[in-house]
Image: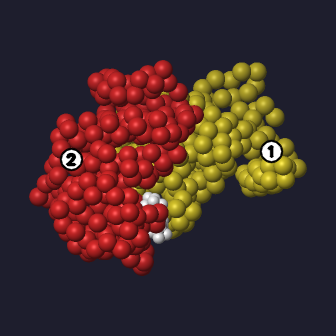
Amino acid sequence: MTLELSGVAVARGAAPVVRDIDLTAPPGAVTVLLGPNGAGKTTLLEAVAGVLPFAAGNAVLDGADLAGLDRVARARRGLALVEQGRTVFSALTVAENVRVVNGSADALDRAVELFPELGRRLDVAAGLLSGGEQQMVVLARALATGPKVLLIDEMSLGLAPVIVRRLLPAVRALADGGVTVLLVEQFATLALEIADSAHVLAGGALTYSGPPGPLRASPGRLHAAYLGETPTEEP
Amino acid sequence: MLDGAVAGLAGGGAYAALGLCLTLMFRLVRVVNFAQAAIGVIGVYGMALLADAGLPYALAAPAGLLAAGLVAAALGWIMARWFAEAGADQRSAIAIAFLVGLLAVSFLAFGTHPRRVPGPFGGALLTVGGVTVTRAAAVCALLAPALAAGAHLLLTRTAVGLRLRALSERPTTAELLGIPSRRLAVGTWAATGALAAAVLMVVAPQQSADQSSLALMVIPACTAALVGGFRSLTGTVAGGLGLGVMQGVLAHVEDLQQYRDAVPFAVILAILVWSQRREVWDAAR
Ligand SMILES: Nc1ncnc2c1ncn2[C@@H]1O[C@H](COP(=O)(O)OP(=O)(O)OP(=O)(O)O)[C@@H](O)[C@H]1O
Ligand SMILES: [Mg+2]
């Protein structure tokens, strides 16, 4: 499924946060969205998932306008948001966190296959796990919904780089399997390694849109985009 | 004295069962549902109306339960549709509006005179050593623990229960995972509404049951839920039964009889002061 945003603006209460967002995330590709703290990355993803309303513009998922669908309906169409900040159901066990979205034994097997360390902790309350383990539960839970479009917000926040180096290839593999991935990431260099295209959001607007190569090759280019100095550039 | 305690079990069982409805509602849909008993009143009076019209009890009672469930579902839908993002405090305030509205509707629909409510649990069950246990008291006292056990099993052993627990902890996240929050919330309202009606159908035939005093049984029920911290099912049952027994004993002591209805108030006050003290203590450390 292709996710297509055109001219999207999102506000929080009365305050406009992002504006004029044109972005296409095609299936089978990892689209990364970078940007400094407070740029509005989370705000944009939350609007796409239906937590916040769009203030302007169009968001289309596989030909269907998202504006008319609430968040449950969007989830049922295959959109999954991995929220920022390890949002496990802490009172539920690891196994229950997966089972609540998908009761099949298969779903749990796949989760353990992807994250073997969860296998020993299936009956532990998710709230008692380490931060990294919780992030694995959150990812496994999102995957158990069988997403066609996966929005991931700061998967690596607070995680050891070793773990991030393991999680990112898992994300790449999902995209290779045909999933549409839109990835927001603090570790810009690591994210760019697995990206097919990149966008930089700064001060509420996109300051770079294009292939990841130029950003990978030149840290100066990335910094300039973070500071909002580079004009939007089509691939 | 023992006589009083046993008689108090009837009321206590009802407080406990209604308290369970309140605890479940608070945990699952974030509301102190002050209209809980008022919803039940609609069911009881609906049943009485149908029974008066000649319908056999075996048909009138399920119809009453259904009516209460439907009214509760409608209120739950209003809450889910327009106040989904509101906090528990605001939603509870709206529940007070529901209570007032339901009482008005109930007086309009059923008249202001108390109705005789038929019931299958009249008379004494057994008399041991001069202490009489009525059938209603036995049913009430057993109903509450059975309900608590049933609710516990539902929440821990079923797929619906799992979804309800997820939803109660993180509603937004649950919705983002495709869990149909509105449908589950309306279902929770409907189920607890029908339960409240069932409880009042056992209690109402035993006393002169006017609509406001039945609807205000939500206050001792709140006390019971408060004993369980609006979280613990066991605590709520213990709180309700304990409160009923205390009231029953007081009713049999000549000098204290008049203070009987102040017991819930005193218990609420004591719990609040105690929990406050603990917070101050924690803060001091
Ligand atoms: N709940 C909220 N209410 C009001 N304003 C908010 C809220 N959350 C974020 N904001 C504001 O919206 C703007 C964008 O925040 P957002 O969380 O989308 O940024 P971000 O790019 O995800 O940042 P980070 O990298 O720190 O996660 C910020 O200016 C922030 O102050
Ligand atoms: Mg963010």
**Label 1 SS:** helix
> Residue A117 location, x and y as percent?
46, 25
- Provide the residue designation for mark 2: A29
Label 1 is placed on what type of residue?
Answer: Leu
User: What chain does badge 1 belong to?
Assistant: B
Quarter of the image where one finds residue B8:
top right
Alpha-carbon distance for marks 2 and 1? Answer: 74 Å
Q: Which chain is red?
A: A
> Residue B20 location, x and y as percent?
56, 42
Relative to B266, does residue A141 appear above or below in the rendering?
above
Going by the image, does B49 lie left or right of A29?
Answer: right
Q: Colour of chain B?
A: yellow
**Label 2 SS:** loop
Label 2 is placed on what type of residue?
Answer: Ala
- Provide the residue designation for mark 1: B250
Furthest-right residue in this view: B255
**A219 or B258: nearer the viewer:** A219
Furthest-left residue in this view: A63
> Residue A38 location, x and y as percent?
46, 66
Residue mark closest to the camera, 2 vs 1: 2
Does residue B200 appear in this view?
no
Indicate if the residue with disc 2 has its beta carbon within 8 Å of ligand 1.
no
Residue at x 49%, y 24% (from the top left corner)? A121
- Viewport quadrant of the C terminus of chain A: bottom left
Q: Are marks 2 and 1 in contact (CB under 8 Å)?
A: no
Going by the image, does A157 lie left or right of B179?
Answer: right
**B149 or A118: nearer the viewer:** A118
Residue at x 37%, y 72% (from the top left corner)? A228
Give the class, few, some or many, for how many residues have Cα within 10 Å of label 2's Cα (few <14, many ≥20).
Answer: many
